[in-house]
Image (cartoon, rainbow, N blue to C red):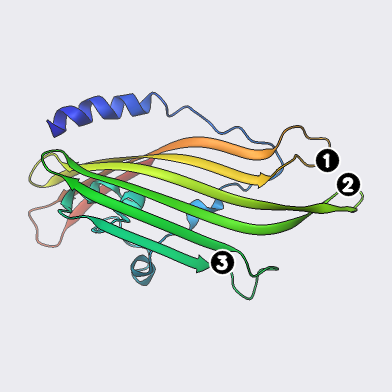
Amino acid sequence: MKKVLFLVLCPALLLFWAYSAEATNESQAAVLMLLIKPGARVGAMGESFVTISDEAAASYYNPAGLAGQRQREFTFMHTKWLPGLALEDNLYYGFLGYSQYLKGWGNIGVNLAYFYMGKQTRTSETGEEKGTFTSYDAVLSVSYGANVSSRTALGVTAKFIQSHLADTGAGIERGKGEGHSIAFDFGILYCSPISGLRLIHYHSI
């Protein structure tokens, strides 16, 4: 049943991969929060987590890692961003993750990441201050992972991304400084007969 589900699910998800973000040119650096790796354990391991992925955060690093879990998992993280360096002290990053085993089907995982970039001063082309605005990024991810053999696990994640850089465009630009997009992650985890050796493949579109 799990093999059939993957054969149906993966091609269906690929049909949506061409969906692209629509945003203004107010900033060319969007959704930088995707470069932030959640989890204290992951940070202590030098972010080398794709071959382990044995907790609720697995859906973020390698959804195939969900397949090895047999209980409910919950993780959260809240941290100030660049304390002492940022102009404001209210920049923060938050992460919530949950995973659950469904007997006979595999594992599902859900996580939400949020990056608040604080208030910023809006200025005109001449440098005149025009008030303030807030910026934030948010990503909601839904994952599925399952064993397809005694040594191989597959996983897929759908990410729904929102980036809110500003409530209006800069200067004569029309529209808002916002963007929305969908992304997909695919993971394979293979446990070889050689003790301690694992092979992985992780791909995002």
Q: Is residue 182 above or below residue 101?
A: above
Q: Is residue 91 above or below residue 183?
A: below
> From this viewpoint, is residue 53 visible?
no
Rendered location of residue 59, percent (x, y): 32, 49
Asked if residue 165 lies left or right of residue 68, the reply is: right
Rendered location of residue 144, percent (x, y): 26, 41
**Mark 2, secondary structure of its residue:** loop
Q: Residue at x 83, y 40 (%)?
A: 171
Given residues 104 and 27, the one toward you in this image is 104
> From this viewpoint, is residue 165 visible?
yes
Given residues 103 and 165, the one toward you in this image is 103
**Mark 3, secondary structure of its residue:** loop
Mark 3 touching mark 2, by CB under 8 A? no
Q: Mark 3 or mark 2, which has the lower sequence index?
A: 3
- Name which residue type carries label 1: Gly
Q: Is residue 104 above or below residue 94?
A: above
- Disc 1: which residue: 171
Q: Residues within 10 Å of mark 1 (few under 14, many from 20)?
A: few
Asked if residue 123 lies left or right of residue 3, the reply is: right
In which quadrant is the C terminus drawn? top left
- Name which residue type carries label 2: Glu
Q: Mark 2 or mark 1, which has the lower sequence index?
A: 2
Q: Residue at x 9, y 58 (%)?
A: 194
Q: Residue at x 54, y 56 (%)?
A: 115
Q: Residue at x 64, y 39 (%)?
A: 178
- Disc 2: which residue: 125
- Name which residue type carries label 3: Trp
Q: CA distance from mark 3 to mark 1?
A: 29 Å
Circle on res. 81: 3
Q: Mark 3 or mark 1, which has the lower sequence index?
A: 3
